[in-house]
Amino acid sequence: MAGDGVTLEDLKKRLAEFAEERDWDQFHSPRNLLLAMVGEVGELSEIFQWKGEVPRGLPNWKDEEKQHLGEELSDVLLYLVRLSDICGVDLGKAALRKLKMNAIKYPANAGSRGSSEKRTEINTDVDNDAGGDCVTGRSIYSDSSTSNGAGSQGSSEKRTRFNTDVHNDAGGD
């Protein structure tokens, strides 16, 4: 497989085999996988800690640093793929759906181009006459005074939500 591309499906199968060979399925609950992934994200973050802004391509990094970065990125990816498998989420389809949702939320020709501003509302109806998935959405902006669910009074956080309905004109998921 050297030099060949790898698919999410390939990774999913290899991770399932890896866990089965070691009798680790018993430990691979969604919660455990998520917490392990968060730990790996922390390790990934440590690589960039105290470096300030880093240019694309990491031109001033040593080969060993780039290799370490690749290992930590891989750890995060592998846990994410395994978590999605255990949860029954088709990660590839979910990612494509999310890209479509983001294209609606941040249209290139409507003020999003070149802007890092976070959009908190969308108001769109999109139909894909050519078939495949299409996303329709409407804004649901919740108020800014919500409890954090942990019983603390006076907690306030801004929450942004929008509903989307994804339709597959071909009749599948």
Image: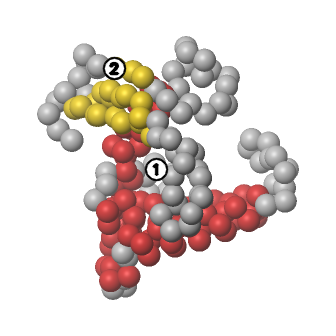
Corner quadrant of residue 12 = bottom left
Q: Is residue 20 above or below residue 124?
A: below
Q: Is residue 150 above or below residue 5?
A: below
Q: Which mark is residue 4?
A: 1
**Viewer-proximal residue, 153 or 69?**
153
Q: Residue at x 31, y 55 (%)?
A: 89
Where residue 134 appears, x then y in whole percent?
30, 27
Is residue 71 something one can see in this rendering? no
Between marks 2 and 1 in the image, the one whose residue lies nearer the viewer: 2
Where residue 32 appears, x then y in whole percent?
44, 75
**Viewer-proximal residue, 36 or 162?**
162
Question: Disc 2 marks which amino acid?
Answer: Val
Give the CA distance from mark 2 to mark 1: 37 Å
**Viewer-proximal residue, 147 or 35?**
147
Q: How many marks?
A: 2
Where residue 98 appears, x then y in whole percent?
42, 39
Question: Disc 1 marks which amino acid?
Answer: Asp
Where residue 135 appears, x then y in whole percent?
33, 29
**Viewer-proximal residue, 126 or 43?**
126
Work out which quarter of the rendered image holds the N terminus and state it: bottom left
The residue to which callout 2 is attached is 126
* Comes first in the chain, label 2 or label 1: 1
Q: Residue at x 34, y 34 (%)?
A: 164
Q: Residue at x 33, y 70 (%)?
A: 16
Q: Is residue 159 above or below residue 166?
A: below
Corner quadrant of residue 133 = top left
Is residue 38 toward the left or the right of residue 19 in the image? right
